[in-house]
Amino acid sequence: MASRILDKSYDPHRVEERWYSFWVGQGFFRADEYSERKAYCIVIPPPNVTGVLHIGHALNNTLQDILVRWKRMEGYNVLWLPGTDHAGIATQNVVERQLAEEGLSRHALGREKFIERVWRWKEQSGGTIINQLKKLGASCDWSRERFTMDEGLSEAVKEVFIRLYREGLIYRSNYIINWCPRCQTALADLEVEHQEIVGKLYYLRYPVAGENAEALVVATTRPETMLGDTAVAVNPQDERYRKWIGKKVLLPVVRREIPIIADPYVDIEFGTGALKITPAHDFNDFEISLKHGLAQIQVIDETGHMNEHAGPYNGLDRFECRREIVGRFEEDGTLVKTEDYRHMVGHCYRCKTIVEPHLSLQWFVRTKPLAEPAIQAVREGRTRIVPELWEKTYYEWMENIRDWCISRQIWWGHRIPAWYCDACGEMVVEKEAPPRCPKCGSETLRQETDVLDTWFSSALWPFSTLGWPRETPELRRFYPTSVLVTGFDILFFWVARMMMMGLKFMGDVPFRDVYIHGLVRDERGEKYSKTRGNVVDPLDLIERYGADALRFTLAALTMPGSDLKLSEARTEGYRHFANKIWNASRFALMNLDEAVDVEETIDPGTLSLPDRWIRGRLNRTILEVRQALEVYRFDEACHSLYQFIWHEFCDWYLELIKPYLYQDEDPLRKRIAQKMLARVLDQTLRLLHPFMPFITEEIWQQLPLKGKGSSIMVSSFPRAYEALEDPQAEEEMGLLIETIVALRTIRSEMNVPPSQSLAISIRAQDDEPLERLERNRLFIERMVKADRVEIGKDTEKPPLSAFAVVRGVELFVPMDRPRMEEELKRLQKEIVKIEKEMAFVSRKLSNEQFIAKAPAHVVEEEREKAAQYEAIRAKLEESSRKIREVLG
């Protein structure tokens, strides 16, 4: 029996690495592509190979791990497929910074040597995050780990590109795109982060050609781009400008005549109602230029500097040009006025540089034909988005989708499989370089220098990782995958594109469910950021509190449609929860004499009330947890587990059965109590395992159970059975618990020392509650520490007594007058003290300057204090009122 006694305290660091190594060594994480068991598959949202574990990763992977551990225990053939993304721009930036420290550049190395250098970095430093995920307890099938530039995935990328190109769904064209002057590459719309800034609205005077005094005034936030204007547009319904339509204005600085055109796009209410059209540097202007056949003149180059079309400003940085040109316009009268103006400005998601709309020759995917089946699949319920509120956002984005720019002007990534003939200009799209030009026969062909957007290869992740385009056993067994767990921030970056590609190339959706969780914020609801200094490292939390405590915290805070407010205090609280489980299990193990057969039938008639009650409560908890997991309500599952383990199993059941475990007079009663204790603990640990895998394995391994198997993670997940419901035991136990709580409250409120026994009188008009309490008299005496308990219809009320009522049952505890008078004085002092605190907070909250100047979280904290003080005072006054009633 000694070998089963747990250490006095739980040390997560002592057990976590040991059990993780055990699980991996036993092959418990591995899926079997040939098994006939029902498949359950999740592909991990691949973190960037440059990344380290942040709190968002911890949340996302905790939720996935809960699901896959649960499904394994349910008997499914589970594949949780891990991997990392090559993260083109991010990874290239990392390696370029290393080169800069050595006094080198990628251009000095050349493309081939640079790519070798990136692969070397990937092998040495890439994938750090994978090892960090293991510390969290992630039970991925590491034997199937993939990388978006693996040979097999590269083959899939080429296959998809060529098929889409041959169907006319990939094309190359001059088009306006988002361009990062710092990263020197095109960006997809979704790679642009829009931030609100306070800028200026400049009102510029454009003279009407041939009219000496007449001019049109336009309003713009970017006066430097006016050098590339090719028209001024007005709304055809705008009476102010109707007479000018068809005429021309003279463009300041470059003195070029440009037409005045009519277009309904122009907002009559914005600015002056006259809009400068700069097709090469504005997305909407570009669309207008196509409609009206306007020239597209670029005045800003790829580096963010003005070019030769900018006249005297050639070579200036775009923002320096703005300052100089505004100064010139102030002097010559072109600038009419300026106004402060709040507007959204696009920034590169990687380097945060302001993005430049840029006319460029790029590769695009024609998305409308791909988006329509993806929209229909969700409408038909073939893929379910949870919570449902995100469906509307999905439809809005997919129905207004623009063609996707997939080319990037960097070196690290999947190089576009297109070759150009220098002799005749022919372009050939093939997986490998053709030996000669199919048009002219020239053997001088060069490959496209651009690489594909990282999200292009990520869009194939659910099927490329399973072996496509080969027909593999994994692909047959695990596609479509079961669920994708992701944050809403990549719903369109990734999810929508996987939907389009999965339907196109597999003929089926890539996943049955998409579960979308919120973002993790700090306890004040602020986003984590280095500038705020509030970033929390999940590895630090694991070091301080253990992986189980962090996992349970994240799951418990995950509510549908809401962000999480994470506080370290909450994680510390769940560390105490782990300690509570440990101590309760330690007590149980010390009181289990021999191995228990959990399959052995126990005569229900031999069970005590606590045994019947805990069996029913456990059954109800199993049902609640299973129902919660089915609908991704992780918070509800955690609440049910916490309530049952802490408040029912530990606080009540273990205390109530101690008399049975400690006595030897009735061996049968003791043995039944031991069997029920072992069964309940076994089922509880299995129910908790997906959420807190390490502590549950450590305890479960020590449980003396016959034929229990090698690990809790491959044991069966508990099931609920209607036959185990026991409403009569629930009712009787409910009355007993409420009675004990009421009597303990009296002891506490009246300041009766724990060492002093109580005398209790109980009376009621109905026989049934009295009979129930009489049957459980011993529990009342023990749990309240009473040396005398009178129960009956005619029980007399003591002259001086504290009083409570539970379900119509009157409870009296005799008290002497001096004690009650002394307690009343103490309560009055406490009321005076709390009212002083309330007055201090009230003065703060009534001070308008404090409300206006103090940070929002400080004001909120003061309001919370005021509410807490009010609640405390109400309790003190209620206790005082009760004593005064007794004293008369």
Image: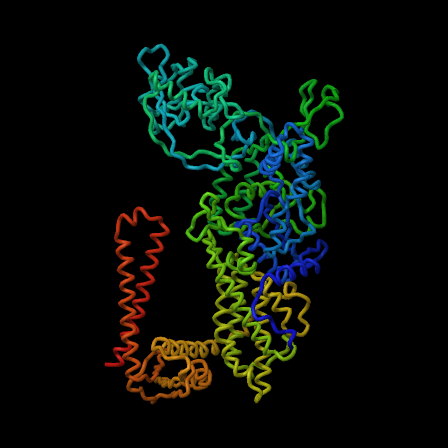
Q: Position of residue 261 (x, y in %)?
A: 40, 20
Location of residue 491 with respect to 860 vertically, above or below: above
Do we see residue 873 in this rendering?
A: yes
The C terminus - image quarter: bottom left
Q: Position of residue 173 (x, y in %)?
A: 58, 26
Q: Position of residue 29 (x, y in %)?
A: 67, 57
Do we see residue 502 in this rendering?
A: no
* Coloring basis for residues: rainbow
How many circles with numbers are drawn on the protein? Answer: 0
Along the line of sight, the residue nearer the viewer: 545 or 626? 545
What residue sits 45% from the left and 28% below the top?
284
Q: Quadrant of residue 229?
A: top left
Instruction: Answer with left or right where residue 657 lies relative to residue 195.
Output: right
Q: Position of residue 873 (x, y in %)?
A: 30, 67
What residue sits 65% from the left and 61% below the top?
18
Location of residue 667 with respect to 727 vertically, above or below: below
| Residue furthest left in the image | 888
Q: Quadrant of residue 200?
A: top left
Along the line of sight, the residue nearer the viewer: 446 or 339? 339
Location of residue 598 with respect to 183 vertically, above or below: below
| Residue furthest front in the image | 102
The N terminus - image quarter: bottom right
Instruction: Answer with left or right where residue 13 lies relative to residue 250.
Output: right
Instruction: Answer with left or right where residue 225 lies relative to residue 597.
Output: left
